[in-house]
Amino acid sequence: MTPEGSEAVVGGAPAAQRAGNRLRLAVLDRDPGFMLVLSNRLDALGCEYRSLTAPATVDALVAMRLNALLVDLAVMGPAGWEYLERVCSRLPGLAVVVCTGPSSVAQRVRGLRLGADAWVTKPCHAEELICVVEAAVRRHRRAEMPALEAAAMFGEITVRPDLYQAYANDMSLELTAREFEILHLLSGSDRVLRREEIYERVWGYAMAHGDRSVDVFVRKLRQKLRSASPRWSYIHTHFGVGYRFTPEPEDAGEPELELVTDPGPAELDTAFAR
Amino acid sequence: MTPEGSEAVVGGAPAAQRAGNRLRLAVLDRDPGFMLVLSNRLDALGCEYRSLTAPATVDALVAMRLNALLVDLAVMGPAGWEYLERVCSRLPGLAVVVCTGPSSVAQRVRGLRLGADAWVTKPCHAEELICVVEAAVRRHRRAEMPALEAAAMFGEITVRPDLYQAYANDMSLELTAREFEILHLLSGSDRVLRREEIYERVWGYAMAHGDRSVDVFVRKLRQKLRSASPRWSYIHTHFGVGYRFTPEPEDAGEPELELVTDPGPAELDTAFAR
DNA sequence: TAGCGCGTAAAGATCTTGTGATCAGGTTGT
DNA sequence: ACAACCTGATCACAAGATCTTTACGCGCTA
């Protein structure tokens, strides 16, 4: 498994995944004719792609910042199944489409069960194949879409996705790229986010067991948030679960009437009663 | 099975959320043989499905609370395209799989571009078809996650899966992660749950013989529930069996006009009383 | 009434998180 | 190309919070 020439095509992309609306695809296949036809279609669509002739490591795939992976299992023989499983489990956010020669129902079922999003049998039309890939990517993207770039304000903090920065009283918090991504993710959701979830959506792949990266970044964020807006608290810990973002004024001393601070159950639009 | 989607909406509701992990599928097809084979597989998987012989309106589909729609475009003829487009655009959270007879590349491309998640050509194997549907749903679920877990109310208690917490009168019960998991599990099921069952579903592995952890947690839960909602009892012991969750007003002497909570005949402890 | 299951309570073990520091790798400016 | 600088990944440790285990006595069933 050689991570040949795995430098990312585009270096500067600050965001891991919000890179763009365009398809970023890697094709693992050794059929020159197939690649030629496919390349023509991909070029015509102005799609960024990279062709591989040997399986890339998971880390290499991460570095490529892909939306989708198109793979011919024949390239790897029996080891292909393991590879498919590893890629799908480590990169749950990556659309994986298998395009390979004649196969049995059992094989296709196995591939799909391992996490592949689609299975296309060769020979096939490039146009159709690309549609299948796009359909798979479309799904994943729907999750990212709501993270549009509208500025939002929480307490004294303003989050500016267009500037990749957050502010308090017109003063920048001087967040680094990753810090901002985490703040942006948290602030865009009013529920508790588990660490694994945060990691997966920011780093782009599954979190290793015992990784404390999220904690460390939350600490840095809290530090900067506190020094910019001392009277508010924003990121709340849910022990054993994860973190939740909600601007709350720091109850500084006098206990006023009740702390109705909990916005939770007040608005159960979807509550059921029995 | 008849297309009356009412039970899903009005009914005992808590089922709606618990079933969140399972596939809820509607099949729009007129081929009896196809349906027969497919039904067998779906039954074997314990999957909830509904078969339709005529296109349902978008609103009807919403009422069915589906994860996926499997459709044979042949049922509608040329109008099928328009239907496909409308369903896909109005219900972006629904996985739509087309399974129809022989088609041209152009038709398949059109279907996928209109928003279908996959296109399977008949004749096909039921097993494979279901895998394709599951792959589409799997991908979808990632995007729909936040909306899936709805809040639920029992007596004076509100359970908020999105906040990993329960409330009574806008006040948090301060449940720990594990306490919440158990309450969530219990409240989602009307029947008596054996200790082993609870343990296995919360801890994730089999309970050791003689382990009292479940009892201890039930005690803590009862304590917090009682102090937050003294006039109700929620977790009931079934001696020698396990526990059952049902909100019941504490009949402290005079029977006031209570909710329709009728403990009498409703006490049929069946698995389907809902 | 005897035996077992269950409620209750507390102490100890274990797991989580907060925090500061260090190290390696990449980026920027010259 | 080189070097200063910045960022992100890990580690170790401490403080808490939570979970498990154990013990005892009462209530339920037979």
Image (spheres, coloured by chain):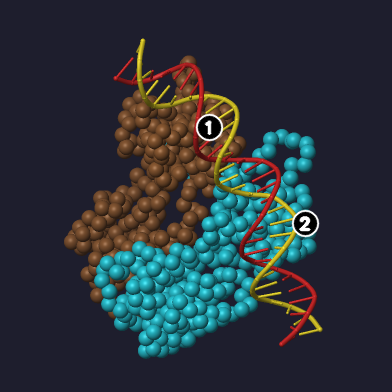
Chain colours: A cyan, B brown, C yellow, D red
| Location of mark 2 (residue) | A228
Please state the horizontal and vertical placement of residue B265, each as a whole percent of the image: 33, 26
Identify the image quadrant of the C terminus of chain A.
top left
Q: Is residue B49 visible?
A: yes
Question: Disc 1 to disc 2, how far (Cα)?
Answer: 40 Å
Q: Which of the two discs, 1 and 2, sits closer to the camera?
A: 1
Within 10 Å of disc 2 (Cα), the crowding (few <14, some 14-19, many 20+) is some
Helix, strand or loop at label 2? It is helix
Return the residue nearer the eye: D8 or B128.
D8
Position of B1 relative to A88 (above/below): above
| Location of mark 1 (residue) | B220
Identify the image quadrant of the N terminus of chain A.
bottom left
What residue is rendered at 66% in x and 42% in y?
A261
Position of A192 relative to A273 (above/below): below
Please state the horizontal and vertical placement of residue B95, each as a whole percent of the image: 39, 62
Return the residue nearer the eye: B186 or B219.
B219
Q: Is residue A99 visible?
A: no
* Pointer 1 chain: B
Q: Is residue B38 left or right of residue A252?
A: left
Please state the horizontal and vertical placement of residue A144, each as a whole percent of the image: 54, 65
What residue is rendered at 32% in x and 66% in y?
A110
Helix, strand or loop at label 1? It is helix
* Pointer 2 chain: A
Which corner quadrant of the image does residue B165 belong to?
A: top right
What residue is rendered at 27% in x and 50% in y?
B2
Give the amino acid type for the residue marked by disc 1 in the picture: Lys
Q: Which mark is residue B136?
A: none
Give the amino acid type for the residue marked by disc 2 in the picture: Ala
Which corner quadrant of the image does residue A195 belong to?
A: bottom right
